[in-house]
Amino acid sequence: MTETSDPYAIPADFSDRVFGVLLAAVDGATHARDGEEPGESEMLSLFLLDGLLEALEWANDGVASDEAACMWLAALRWYKVITGAYPEGAPEPQPRWIDESFAGADTFAPGDTQHRVALAEKDMASVGRPIFPEADSTGVLSRAAFMALLPRVDEATTAKLATDAAALTHGSPLAHKTAGAAALVVRSALERGSMAAPQWAQLIEGLEGVAADGLRTAVQVATEALKNPDAHGAYDGIFELLGPDEEDTEHTIDIEVASFACALIGAVLGTDAIAHRPASALDPILDQMHDRWIKLTVGE
């Protein structure tokens, strides 16, 4: 990658890296569940990204919009797809393309339980008005990776989007801070590839809490996996490093940690890292999300 003085310059392979993040985040979660899909957690991350996309569409048409509110409405649409109904007393937004894409699915692999609990409320949670102020879990990680996909904004905006997305379900300031840092880690990978890896430890330094521990594990695993010069080998190394020791028969892989670690590899290596993985039932949805996102944010 060539160096540039433009702080908002987009790498030539940005589109491929974005697609790599989307594919890897979903595949990582699916792999951690031994192939069970679709999963609630990565679905929520996709809906939240579509919520941000909707806000950008409004802005592109010259209409002011609130990104956090659009993401909340998208989360309510996710809740309806998962449960069959909107929360009692909550707004009932009109469905979008992604809702229709999941219309044929009738079972969903469970994810972070905090997602359903928080989104069952009729009111929107935010950083300033948390509904579950103690909630802190790794469930904020994969959505943070997706918030990093917005180009041509400053780092403060990237971190704020991830923080706002986290606050919709998790009220702990520890989770909010971790989400912001997680997004900046992925952003650095999108912009600088493997050259960004030495910076990751600094970006997550001092973080505390459950989400922070998960982020730290994901970053450490991805950093180690990237020592493999082969893209497929680096990606597969994630699960070798996250997997159990031979003597630990009760070990389970945290779905959110696996999803984020794989997304980080995808941000560095693009689709080359995941080209060997089995096709997913979500691939058509990921194709659409990628195409819609790149068309609006990059113009390709």
Image: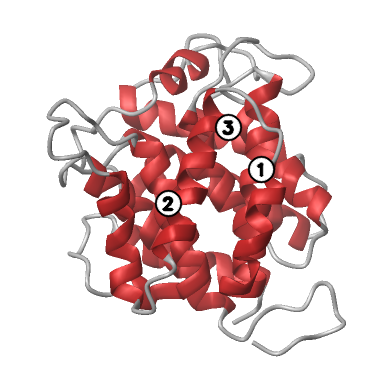
Report which quarter residue 128 is drawn in: top right
Amino acid on which disc 3 is placed? Ala
Taking 67 as reference, is 88 above or below it? above
Q: What is the CA distance from the residue labelled 2 to the residue labelled 1?
A: 14 Å
Taking 62 as reference, is 6 above or below it? below
Q: Nearer the viewer, mark 2 or mark 3?
A: 2
Report which quarter residue 169 is drawn in: top right
Report whether residue 69 is seen. no
Report whether residue 62 is seen. yes
Q: Quadrant of the C terminus?
A: bottom right
Q: Quadrant of the N terminus?
A: bottom right
Which residue is tagged 2?
Answer: 221
The image position of residue 43, as x and y in percent, is: 38, 41
**Dots 1 and 3: beta carbons under 8 Å?**
yes
Q: Residue at x 35, y 32 (%)?
A: 81
Q: Residue at x 63, y 73 (%)?
A: 195
Mark 1 nearby-residue class (10 Å; few <14, some 14–19, many ≥20): many
Amino acid on which disc 1 is placed? Ile
Count of picture labels: 3
Taking 14 as reference, is 248 above or below it? above
Mark 2 nearby-residue class (10 Å; few <14, some 14–19, many ≥20): many
The image position of residue 142, as x and y in percent, is: 48, 44
Amino acid on which disc 2 is placed? Val
In the depicted view, which residue is nearer to us: 152 or 192? 192
Compare marks 2 and 3 and give the one earlier in the sequence: 3
Label 2 SS: helix
Which residue is tagged 3?
Answer: 212
Which residue is tagged 1?
Answer: 204
Is residue 27 rendered to the left or right of residue 176?
A: left
